[in-house]
Amino acid sequence: MRHPRVNGRRPRRALSIGAAALIVAAIVPLAPAVGATPIPRSAAGTATPQTTGAVGTPTGFAAVSGWGQNGTTGGAGGPTVTVNTASEFLAAIARTGPLIIKVDGMIALPGPMHNVTSDKTIVGLGAHSGFTGGGLNIGLGANDDVTSPPANRVHNVIIQNLTFDDWADDAVNVQMFSHHVWIDHNTFVGGFDGAADVKRGSSFVTVSWNHSTHGKNMLAGASAENGAQDSGRLNITYHHNFFDGTVERNPWVRFGNPVHVYNNYYRNISKYGVRSTSDAGILVEGNYFQDVPVPFQLSGGGGTTGNLVSRNNCFANSGTPQTGGSVKPVPYTYQLQPCQDVPALVTAGAGAGKL
């Protein structure tokens, strides 16, 4: 492996940068963000005191209060059910009220998508539980005419420790102003469309510690024509994910600002790592890009250019990244690991079975 290149600058207020400065030198460990608290690999190691049924608690936007919801607690306060058939699982995710759903083994779901109601924790047991065939939809049906959050929007959902394979549409889709969703420690093997897409006005989402080998990986923003729903929303945190031989969309963001991409490991990406278009604003920091021809870019796929600020990233055998514009500050504290530590940290901890 070649010695990585490091780039970075820490603005004081609005994040702004022109061309990224790439420095070939020894890598200096990063200081924690001001006011940050350490984030262990699995975020905890035991179920939270709220008895959410998940391991740990989210960091980033899923932990930020907003839209009438104080953080993301999933099925806390509800009963627990264990399911091992498609019929049991589909009945469970359709129930109203808080519910912790434990998935025991791989379940073959009919395609394509299945709606998850609010206040649910869906967690896999062991290292080999999850779904083939079908995907999970967290949100109301798509409707271009709805441009403000409806009262019955889906919220407060945790998806953890699951393996998704051979999905017929998306593996996980968050849409129609859904909010407070935590997608954590899952493995996305491969399927038809997105592994974990967030669009149509959704916000307060954290995507963390996942391992993906799927081509069209993670999209934020439905299209360049969907600004009426997406502008001012799509606040998402992506951290400690392993993007392993994917093709693109790691993520591709339209309109969302800020979107925070930190401490992810990109390895053998065939097209590009991160893309910012349609006036999106992405802070990309502390990531490791290995064998990535275009680590990040500000155009492509239609729409106007986006904004992207790069700080303290490592580049090994990778191309020159594109940066520019300004990004709003993120409204939370976090612990940033040095980029040179990311490959070992993320490969050891990302994916199902590694809580």
Image (cartoon, rainbow, N blue to C red):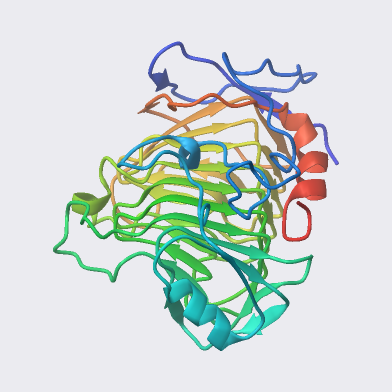
The quarter holding residue 66 reads: top left
| Left or right side of 323 for 191 | right
The quarter holding residue 34 reads: top right
Whole-percent x and y of residue 183?
A: 56, 54
Q: Nearer the viewer, residue 147 or 254?
A: 147
Whole-percent x and y of residue 343?
A: 78, 42
The residue shown at (69%, 60%) is 245
The quarter holding residue 178 reads: bottom left
Q: Nearer the viewer, residue 228 or 163?
A: 163
Q: Above or below — where is 352 with respect to 60?
A: below
Q: Above or below — where is 28 with respect to 133?
A: above
Q: Residue furthest top?
A: 12
| Left or right side of 340 for 193 | left
Whole-percent x and y of residue 197?
A: 45, 60
Q: Above or below — where is 68 with respect to 93?
A: above
Whole-percent x and y of residue 206?
A: 52, 46
Is residue 299 something that shows in the picture?
no
Screen quadrant of the N terminus: top right
